[in-house]
Amino acid sequence: MGKDITNEQLFEFMTKMYSDLNGKIDNMDREMKEGFKEVKHDIVRLENKMDMNHKALYDGYKLTYEKLTMLEEKVNEIDKKVERQDVEIRVIKGAN
């Protein structure tokens, strides 16, 4: 017939399987920890990039607001000049 497997052989086989499985689990654990570290680094990098973009957007908004305020002041000055000239024109026309 075939080979008879002894308890000792079965024990050795199971011990070898356990050792191989343990090694693979340890390797997977190590790879997962490294993967998580890389993901954490990627997240930090994205947060920094978002922070810089947020600051750039805020600066752009601030510059736009300042420019708008400056243009509004100029329009107000021009409006006052036009009103004065309109009054002067009426006065001149009334004098004639």
Image (tube, rainbow, N blue to C red):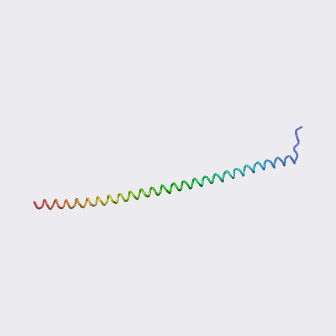
On the rendered structure, is 30 left or right of 85?
right
Give residue 48's position: percent from left, percent from top: 53, 56
Q: Nearer the viewer, residue 48 or 93?
A: 48
Q: Nearer the viewer, residue 71 or 8?
A: 71
Q: Nearer the viewer, residue 87 or 67?
A: 67
Give the quadrant of the N terminus: top right
Q: Kindly give the residue lying farthest to the right in the view shown.
A: 1
Q: How many marks?
A: 0
Residue at left 46%, top 58%? 55
Residue at left 88%, top 40%? 3
Q: Is residue 23 above or below residue 58?
A: above
Residue at left 55%, top 54%? 45
Give residue 19's position: percent from left, percent from top: 78, 50
Give the quadrant of the C terminus: bottom left
Give residue 77's position: percent from left, percent from top: 27, 61
Residue at left 29%, top 59%? 74
Q: Nearer the viewer, residue 9 or 39?
A: 39
